[in-house]
Amino acid sequence: MPQVIYEDLGLMEYQPTWDYQEQLLKHNTDIKLYNREHAEKRQTVNSLLFCEHPHVYTLGKSGDEKNLLLDANALEVAEAKFVRINRGGDITYHGPGQIVGYPIFDLEYFQTDLHLYLRSLEDAVINTLKHYSIKAGRIHGLTGVWIDEERTGYERKICAIGVRCSRWITMHGFAFNINTNLDYFKNIIPCGLNDKAVTSLQQELQHEVDIEEVKLILKNELAKKFGYDYM
C-alpha cells in the first residue's frame, strides 16, 4: 500500500508554500530521471500538505486577468495579494478559514489518469460533506464540488480544484471553503463563471465549524479514496 507524508503547514503565505511544492515536485522528478538511467531504482515520495493562506487571489495559466475585479490599490485596501501561477483553471481566492490541500502524489502509485485523479479529489470532498449531512456533487464539464448542482440557478461551489502534473507527479490541488469570508469572492469572477454562486460549510450549516475536525475527516476520506496509509 502506498505511503503518504502528511504535513499541516498552518497559516502560511502563498509564495513560500508554492516554492515548497516545487521543491517536493523537483525531488520526485529528479528521482524519476535517475531511475531512467540506473538499474538500482529509488522511490518517489508522496506528500499531502494542508494549510490556510492569508488573503490571496491566484490566476491559473489559462485564466483571464479580467476576472480579477480589483486594481492594485483596491487589492492593498483588501489586504490581499494577486499571484499568477502554473496550475490549470482560472482565478480563485484563498484565505483564512479555508482548507487548501496540496497533494504531491506520484500517480504511478495510484492511477495514471489525470481525469480520474480529479474525480477522486472531488469524491473525497463529497464524502467529507456527507459527515455533515450535506449532499454535494458535480456539474458536467466543471471541475470542483457543488451543492444543489442539479437545480439551475441554485448551484453553489464549495470546493475549487486546479492541478498541475509533471511526469505523473501532481502539485497544486483544492480549496475547500469551511469558515471562509465569502465577501472576498465578490472581487473576482470565480473560475471565470459569473452565473454561479460560492458557498462554505459554515454558510450551509449556519454556524461556525471546527476546521480541525474537518481536516481529520478529509484526511481519512482522501486515504480511503486513494488507498494509502499515512507515514
Image: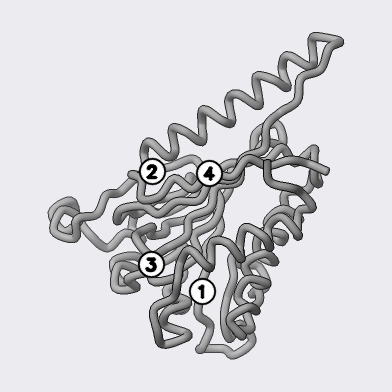
Q: Amino acid at mark 1?
A: Lys
Quadrant for the N terminus in the image:
top right
**Residue 17 horizontal side relative to residue 109, left or right:** left
Residue holding disc 4: 7
Secondary structure at badge 3 equals loop
Residue designated by label 3? 189
Q: Earlier in the sequence, mark 3 or mark 4?
A: 4
Which numbered disc covers residue 62?
A: none
Q: Residue at x 38, y 43 (%)?
A: 84
Asked if one can make out residue 172 in the rendered structure from this viewpoint, the answer is no
Residue at 68% x, 58% y is 222
Mark 3 → mark 2, Cα distance in angstroms = 15 Å
Q: Using the rendered image of the protein, determine whether residue 47 is visible from the camera's viewpoint.
A: yes
Say which label, 1 or 4, has the lower sequence index. 4
Tell us which disc is closer to us: 3 or 4. Answer: 4
**Residue on which disc 2 sits:** 84
